[in-house]
Amino acid sequence: MTHIILISKDYPNIARQELESLLEISLKPFVDGYFITEDKFDLKLLPRLGLTREIYEVKQTFDTSNEEQVLENMNLDNIKNSYKIDVVSFEGLSKDVKQFADKLHVKLKNPLVDIKNPENTYVFFWTLFEVKLTKSIFSNKDNPHGRRSHLKEFNHPTSIHPKIAKAMINMGAKKSFIDPFCGAGGIVIEGALMGLDVKGSDVDTQMIKRAKANSKAFGLEIDLEEKDALKLRDEVECIVTDLPYGKNSRLTNDLVDLYCDFFTVANGLTDLIIVGAHADTDMDAYLDESNFYVWKQFPIYVHKSMTRTISILKKDDGE
């Protein structure tokens, strides 16, 4: 089964990694920001996606861009129940959607057009050399902007945007994770809303109080604990966290020591860490005493005085 996927154009590299990690698929570019995959995946995971906009299942491919030939060769059994037709055209093509939909309508035996509330939405991807008839199977209706830090009961100035937090989680966690620097709870809240088993801790008493208040506002009961990250001992599936920053986002000696010591401790807790940090953070320098290495990194522009880097850290198996 082939699928066409439209990802966020704001963070395309992160969006692609989120898909490949969570759904365990490989993607190849299709056209104009769309990707295509022929790998099978679990449909139940799709609501977790943070940076994927739409997913379409390919029902039929036509080796022509001629409208009449497409209509003539179409398997009309692919159009079922009440439906809506749309056309996405590329490479300078311009298609009259209504005109094409009317021609298709005439060919169907019992057409049930429903523009406002169709059971199925069929999208024709039209290029110069081929046309793909697809059925929409996922449209991201989540509203992460409503969960941004400044809208929560307790704000944190360096909190990650919810859709980025979701992508970070999906890069590593299948069922559970811990955030040992949870702050006001941004990452663990997103994980709990996904239905994952999440835990958060922070050495700052006030931060834990804020995280609990923010979680309660979303009707969530999250395991949150005041605890030093260097005293963690229980093994976990994955660590997903945003490292604490220094004053004005500059590292202090204390933070450098904290980073080095934390990754050494994490060495005995998990094989995978998804971590956000200020772009000035030299992640490789803090991994010397651990078995972790930087597998991939993704920069994120926040504002003119701040850029983040999301890093995927994996355990070196020695091979």
Image (cartoon, rainbow, N blue to C red):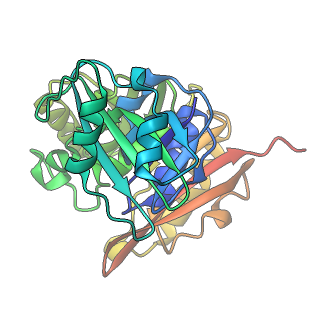
The quadrant holding residue 147 is top left
What percent of the width, then of the height, locates residue 75?
46, 27
Answer whether residue 156 is visible to the viewer in this image. Answer: yes
In the picture shown, does residue 284 fall above or below 316? below
Residue placed most toward the observer, 4 or 9: 4
Residue placed most toward the observer, 165 or 206: 165
Answer whether residue 180 is visible to the viewer in this image. Answer: no
Left or right, 129 with reference to 212: right
How many numbered marks have been drawn onto this rendered protein structure?
0
What percent of the width, then of the height, locates residue 271?
67, 36
Q: Residue furthest right?
A: 319
Residue placed most toward the observer, 142 or 241: 142
Which residue sits at x=50%, y=75%?
A: 280
* The N terminus - image quarter: top right
Which residue sits at x=35%, y=33%?
A: 138
In the picture shown, does residue 30 fall above or below 247? above
In the picture shown, does residue 288 fall above or below 59? below
Which residue sits at x=15%, y=30%?
A: 218
What percent of the width, then of the height, locates residue 272?
62, 40
